[in-house]
Each structure stands twice: as C-alpha cells, then as structure tokens.
Image (cartoon, grey):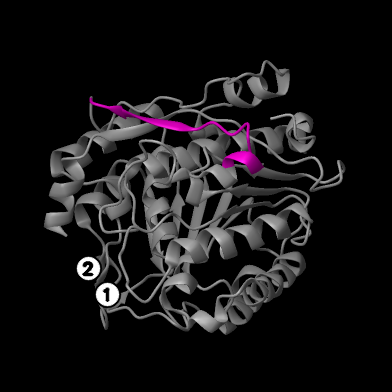
C-alpha cells in the first residue's frame, strides 16, 4: 500500500480537456430517455463508429486539489448542452436528501470515497481535503484491500481517510458485511465490504455493495432482501461490472451471448426493483494494464462486455425512464489518460471525472424530469 501511494503521488494529475456526449439516433426511439456518454476512441474502428467523440486528458502540474470542471463545448452551441454543463448547482446541493447505491467491484468501491468528499459544502470539503493532504491520502483509499477473515469494520478502513470524513464531514458508516456480498469466480485474498454511509448535514445516503460479477445468485438475494423494499428508494443506482468476469471467468463463459444472457438476467431484477424516478448509471470496465499471457482482458472488455452493454442500453432492455452509460474503457484509453496504480485501479482524476458527469446529468434529470432532448436525438 505504501509503495502504491508513493507511486501515485509521483504521477501528475490528469484532467479531461473536452467531452462530447452522443447517442446514435438509430439506436433508440426518441421517446426513450437512455443516454450514452463516451470519450475519445482508442482505435480507427471506434473512431469511424463514433466520429464526434472528443475527450482528451492533459496533465495538471499543480497537484491533487486544483480540480476544475473539465467540460468545454466542442463544435456545439446547443442550448441544452450549456444548460447541462453550466447551470448545474454544486454537488452538495444536488445530492441533498438523495440516496445513492453503488453496485460493483473494487473499482466501484474506489468511487465511493471521492463521492463522500465531493458532496460536502465548500468550507467543509476544504477542511477534509487539507487533512487528507497532510496525511498523504486520497478518498479512493477509504477501504483498501486487506487480508481475508478480517471482520472489524473500522479496523480495515484507512483511518486517515475515514476520520476526517466522520469528524469534519459528518459522515457515519454502518457495516453491512455479510452473506449479501458475493463474487462467484473471484480469485482474491482480500476482504471487501458492504456498508451504508449517511451524511447528517445534507441527509445524503450512499450504500455500497460488493457485487463485481455481471450477474450472480447473490444478486437475487440482495435485491429481494435489501434493495427492493417498499420504503427503500434510491435516486441513483450505479452498476459497475464486467472486469471480474473478464479477469476470472473461464474464457468459454465470456462470449457475447453468455455476457448478454447475464446482463439480461440483471436487467430483469432492475426493472422489477426500481421505479422510473431512479437514474441508472452503467459504467463499463476500465482498460486493464495487467499482463496475463493466457488472457485477453482488454479485448473481452471492449469487444464483448462493452459492446453488449451498449446494445442493451440502446435497445431499452433495462426498462428505466433514464439510463446513462459511461464508457469507462474509452475514458481510460483516451489520449494522455491517467495511469492506473496497479494495472486496473485508477486514482483521483478518474473518480472526479465520473462524479462530475453523473452530478450534472442527475441535476438535469431531477430538475427537468427527463434527460436533454438533444442528447436523446443524437445531436451531441
């Protein structure tokens, strides 16, 4: 962990310079509210398929805490674009009295720590940021991997990250470790946590559950016993899955048909569980820089997992009034992308980018009760 931290702090923070949002008009009826968010393609084939996608990263030499909005208009002056990008309230107001559910593996777990910081009021956020800087930590280190058979919730968190969130940020954490966390094919020596956190200043709730498989039997149990209660509403549900399938499942189970079947089973649970006021956000897996001679993870992620998920979202299979797809693979393959610190886990810049995207789209959706018409018509 210490070596990883030294490596991370030696890297320049990279931020995206511009972004274009696109939904191919032939993929969805105009009455649908599904959204496709993407970044610069990594190869010629994808550039031909999505010619207007422009997201570039550039190094910020000032350090971790010089984050500014990365959105800049690119070849568009559509009023919806400017309304989405420039009219969104700050995150601590957007997420006031809101509930967020994060479902996925360790790359989703990393997103949570940045969320806890990003939704704090500016003065409180600055205090927590200063304490993190002093301790040399960042939000994604909130629950680093620890050896299995650890059961004490607070001892397996990073106190330097958690204590400022609790003492200055008014976050409280409740351990949900138990049988509802599951991964059928994981090859890991680490404990992963299910938990729920509340912010008592803004009445914001975030729940994280360790479910990295595209679909597993633990989903059936968790949706029935935890998520789908009549008095349990989520305003945003994040689904970040596919990397573990690509890394651990037998290659015979990684065909498009097999992946499609698992996503369709997940879709059935989502349709039955969440009402049209819930914003579903799918994030495809990040690019992996790990070298495994007998695996082709990136090809599986890009050509199978990402392609299938794009198709299912575009066809409205998930049956929600609002579905947002963030292409994590392209985001981590865009020019001058931030480097992962261990092969497939990325640092602060990626997480800030994700929450900047989600915050602005969610603000528009909750205010307008729909997603931007121009985006649905494929004009971005």
Residue 63 placement, left or right of 231: left
Dividing the picture into quadrants, the one containing residue 333 is: top left
Q: Residue at x 45, y 83 (%)?
A: 185
Residues 59 and 52: in front is 52
State the residue lying farthest toward the front: 44
Instruction: Give the percent coordinates (x, y) of residue 18.
Output: 50, 26
The residue that label 1 is drawn on is 152
* Badge number at residue 227: none
Q: Tally the numbered discs.
A: 2
Instruction: Give the percent coordinates (x, y) of residue 92.
Output: 49, 34
Residue 314 placement, left or right of 135: right
- The magenta span reads 47-61
Tell me the quarter of the image containing the N terminus.
bottom left
Residue 52 placement, left or right of 175: right
Q: Secondary structure at mark 1?
A: loop
247 in the magenta segment: no
Q: Are marks 1 and 2 in contact (CB under 8 Å)?
A: yes
The residue that label 2 is drawn on is 155
User: Does 198 appear above or below 269?
Assistant: above
Tell me the quarter of the image containing the C terminus.
top right
Give the crowd class for mark 1: few <14, some 14-19, many >=20 residues within 10 Å: few
Q: Residue at x 74, y 71 (%)?
A: 268
């Amino acid at each position: 962990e210490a070596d990883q931290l030294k490596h991370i702090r030696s890297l320049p923070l990279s931020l995206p310079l511009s972004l274009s949002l696109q939904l191919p008009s032939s993929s969805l009826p105009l009455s649908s509210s599904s959204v496709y968010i993407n970044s610069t393609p990594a190869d010629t084939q994808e550039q031909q398929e999505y010619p207007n996608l422009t997201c570039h990263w550039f190094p910020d030499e000032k350090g971790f805490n010089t984050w500014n909005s990365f959105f800049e208009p690119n070849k568009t002056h559509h009023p919806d674009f400017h309304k989405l990008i420039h009219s969104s309230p700050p995150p601590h107001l957007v997420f006031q009295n809101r509930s967020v559910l994060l479902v996925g593996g360790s790359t989703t777990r990393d997103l949570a720590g940045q969320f806890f910081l990003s939704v704090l009021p500016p003065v409180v956020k600055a205090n927590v940021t200063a304490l993190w800087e002093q301790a040399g930590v960042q939000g994604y280190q909130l629950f680093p991997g620890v050896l299995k058979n650890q059961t004490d919730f607070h001892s397996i968190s990073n106190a330097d990250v958690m204590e400022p969130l609790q003492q200055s940020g008014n976050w409280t954490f409740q351990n949900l470790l138990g049988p509802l966390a599951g991964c059928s094919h994981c090859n890991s020596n680490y404990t992963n946590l299910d938990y729920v956190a509340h912010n008592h200043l803004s009445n914001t709730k975030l729940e994280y559950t360790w479910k990295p498989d595209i679909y597993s039997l633990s989903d059936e149990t968790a949706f029935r016993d935890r998520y789908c209660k009549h008095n349990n509403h989520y305003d945003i549900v994040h689904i970040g899955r596919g990397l573990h399938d690509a890394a651990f499942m037998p290659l015979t189970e990684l065909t498009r048909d097999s992946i499609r079947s698992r996503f369709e089973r997940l879709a059935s649970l989502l349709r039955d569980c969440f009402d049209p006021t819930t914003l579903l956000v799918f994030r495809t897996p990040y690019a992996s820089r790990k070298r495994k001679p007998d695996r082709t993870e990136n090809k599986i992620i890009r050509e199978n997992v990402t392609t299938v998920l794009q198709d299912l979202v575009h066809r409205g299979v998930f049956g929600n009034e609002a579905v947002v797809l963030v292409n994590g693979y392209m985001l981590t393959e865009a020019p001058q992308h931030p480097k992962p610190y261990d092969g497939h886990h990325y640092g602060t810049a990626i997480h800030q980018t994700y929450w900047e995207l989600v915050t602005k789209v969610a603000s528009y959706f909750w205010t307008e009760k729909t997603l931007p018409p121009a985006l649905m018509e494929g004009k971005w």
